[in-house]
Image: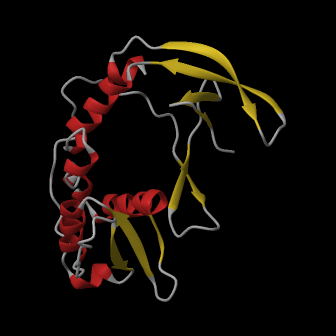
C-alpha cells in the first residue's frame, strides 16, 4: 500500500468468525483512509463519487483485451449470462453509463422509465459490429508509485467465460477489505 499510494498504512493482525470453518480465522487488516484510495481510482478512471454521476471509464477502451476484461468484471458484479442466447445482461440504474456502453458495443438500449435499474444486453457477437474504437489514455496517476509484480499466471475458471489471474500476497496471506476477509487464491 505504501509503495503504490504513498499512504502510511498499518498492518494489524485480526481474527474474523468463519461460518465455513466454524471457528475464528486469522487474517490481517490494512488501515488506510478509503476515501483517499477512492479519489485515486476516480482520478484514474474518471468519474464522480456519487454512483449515479459516474461516467463510463474510458480508460478501459485502451484495447479490446482491456475492454473484454472490463465487461467480464462488470458482469461478475452487476450482471449475468443471458439464459436464451449467447449474451451478457448488464444491470445499472445509471442510464448515461449504460447508454455510452451500448454505443461502444453497438447495442440498442431502451432505459426503464419507472425508476428501476435498466438492463443492457451485450451479445457475444458484438465485436463483429465494428463499433469498438481504441482510445489512448494516460495510465500515470498524479501521485502514485508502482508496486513490483513478481509474477502473473493465467488460470482457467471452469464456471465462467472469463479470465482469472492468480496473485500472491507476501508476506501476509489475507487481510480485511471493508470488513470482508480477502485471501489469496489457491
For residue 171, say whether it is visible: no
Using residue 140 as the reference point, say whether residue 17 is left or right of it.
right
Residue occupying image coordinates x 62% and y 21%: 28
View extreme (right): residue: 22
Name the image quarter holding the N terminus: top left
Residue in view at x 33 percent, y 16 percent: 6
Residue 13, image x, y percentages: 65, 15
Q: Is residue 123 above or below residue 160?
A: below
* Res 173 quadrant in image: top right
Residue for point 26% across, 61% down = 63
Quarter of the rendering containing residue 126: bottom left
Q: Residue furthest bottom?
A: 84
The image shows a total of numbered marks equal to 0
Q: Is 88 displayed left or right of 83 in the figure?
A: left
- Residue 94 is left or right of residue 151, and the answer is left
Considering depth in this image, is 149 or 27 the residue closer to the camera?
27
Instruction: State whether residue 98 is above or below residue 26.
Output: below
**Residue 141: image location, x then y, percent:** 22, 31
Q: Residue at x 58, y 30 (%)?
A: 169
- Residue 105 shows up from this direction: yes
Q: Quadrant of the C terminus?
A: top right
Residue 152 at what x, y percent from top left?
51, 45
Amino acid at each position: 500500500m505504501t509503495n503504490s499510494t504513498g499512504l502510511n498504512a498499518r498492518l494489524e493482525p485480526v481474527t474474523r468468525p468463519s461460518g465455513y470453518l466454524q471457528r475464528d480465522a486469522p487474517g490481517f487488516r490494512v488501515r488506510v483512509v478509503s476515501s483517499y484510495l477512492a479519489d485515486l481510482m476516480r482520478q484514474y478512471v474518471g468519474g464522480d463519487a456519487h454512483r449515479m454521476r459516474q461516467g463510463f471509464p474510458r480508460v478501459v477502451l485502451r484495447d479490446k483485451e482491456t475492454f473484454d476484461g472490463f465487461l467480464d468484471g462488470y458482469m461478475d458484479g452487476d450482471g449475468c449470462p443471458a439464459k436464451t442466447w449467447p449474451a451478457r445482461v448488464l444491470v445499472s440504474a445509471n442510464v448515461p453509463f449504460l447508454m455510452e456502453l451500448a454505443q461502444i458495443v453497438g447495442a440498442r438500449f431502451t432505459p426503464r422509465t419507472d425508476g428501476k435499474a435498466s438492463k443492457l444486453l451485450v451479445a457475444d457477437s458484438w465485436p463483429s459490429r465494428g463499433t469498438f474504437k481504441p482510445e489512448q489514455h494516460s495510465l500515470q496517476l498524479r501521485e502514485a508509485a508502482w508496486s513490483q509484480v513478481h509474477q502473473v499466471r493465467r488460470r482457467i475458471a471452469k464456471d465462467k467465460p472469463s479470465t482469472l489471474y492468480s496473485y500472491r500476497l507476501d508476506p501476509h496471506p489475507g487481510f480485511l477489505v471493508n470488513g470482508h476477509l480477502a485471501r489469496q487464491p489457491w
